[in-house]
Image (spheres, rainbow, N blue to C red):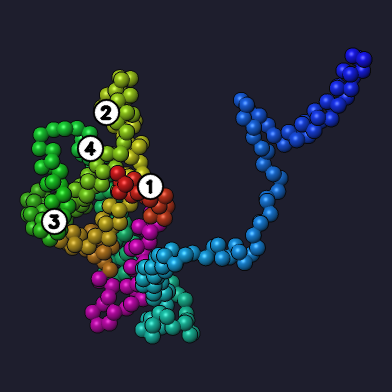
Amino acid sequence: MTDTHHSDDSTDAEPDTDRDSDADTDLSTDGGRVYHEPPETAPTADRSPVERVRAAVPSGPRALRYAVAIGVALLWLVPLIGLFMASVRPLDQVIQGWWSFEGMTITFENYARAWEFQSGPMRQAMWNTAIVTIPSVLAVTLLGTMVAYPFARFDFPLKTALFFLLIVVMAAPPELVAMGNYNTLRTTGLFDTYMGLILVHIGWGMGWVVMFLRNFLLGLPEELEEAARIDGASRYQIFKSIVLPYSAPALVSVAVIQFTWVWNSFFFPLVFMRSRENQLAPQVLPLMKGRLQIDWGLVAAGSVLTMIVPIVLFVTLQRYYKQGMVAAVAD
């Protein structure tokens, strides 16, 4: 009797084991947790196409925000489109309006003329602009980081007064300090030289760079620096190995903004650069308009050549630029 009972129990238990094993064929365990294997095909939509379209339509407030954003984008894009269309069309078609596409002729002759313009070739002007812009951006970015770090971490006498002085210099108009810089460059022999203009841009950009990077570095966790100091790292090692890598998005943001400002700057080159061979791109553009008649196609082509470099730089580094801007504003 006993053997028969046990044999019946074992016989009845086998189907349960099989069912359990079949139910767990698509499961895997790790430390007591059960994971479902991903399906081989995507799940079918449980909503009809009409319901999905209704769900995708934004609500009233969101639709209003979209409309405002699109409107602002069009306000910026339409002049740029008009500028480009004027640069690739003959003058007689540009005078009729760039939005007139009847009998439109596409030509790149305006770019060739601007590149080798007699009174100031854009080829040489863009090279001169790069000579001034690149050192100005690199120097102000590195020096701004070195100045912003003490303002964010250390306590020293006159800290608030010095930071306020930087803000005042940043808020002052460039015309206010042009005369002082003019006399200084004349006295030191740096007038009408690349180095003199580079120093002016470095001094002028230092205020906003320090303020921007200081706000960013305030969000740097102090625990990282304390851990490095416990391990025997010096201040220089902390700055090089922790602060600079952590500040990479903010440094890219500073570099992009400073590059755009220096590249497109017109007032400082107009005041401090007089030689024809040293003129920068913003100085050459007004020369293309002519004396009797403005050749809008030539001016448009020169404008596109001037602005293409900052646009390419921004598109290339826009991911890091956004990260740095958001972090600096949030902190």
| Quadrant position of residue 14 | top right
Q: Earlier in the sequence, mark 1 or mark 4?
A: 4
Mark 2: few/some/many CA within 10 Å (<14, 14-19, 20+): few
Q: Write the residue at 45% across / 75% down.
A: 107
In this view, 103 is above or below 155: below
Q: Nearer the viewer, mark 2 or mark 3?
A: 3
Q: Earlier in the sequence, mark 2 or mark 3?
A: 3
Number of the label disc, if any, that sits on residue 236: 2
Q: Is residue 199 visible?
A: no
Q: Are marks 2 and 1 in contact (CB under 8 Å)?
A: no
Number of the label disc, if any, that sits on residue 255: none
- Residue 223 image point, x, y percent: 32, 28
Report helix, strand or loop for mark 4. helix
Q: What is the C-alpha distance between the residues marked 1 and 4?
A: 20 Å
Q: Write the residue at 10% across / 58% down.
A: 176
Q: Earlier in the sequence, mark 4 or mark 2?
A: 4
Q: Which residue is mark 1?
A: 323
Q: Write the residue at 22% across / 62% down.
A: 266
Number of the label disc, if any, that sits on residue 172: 3
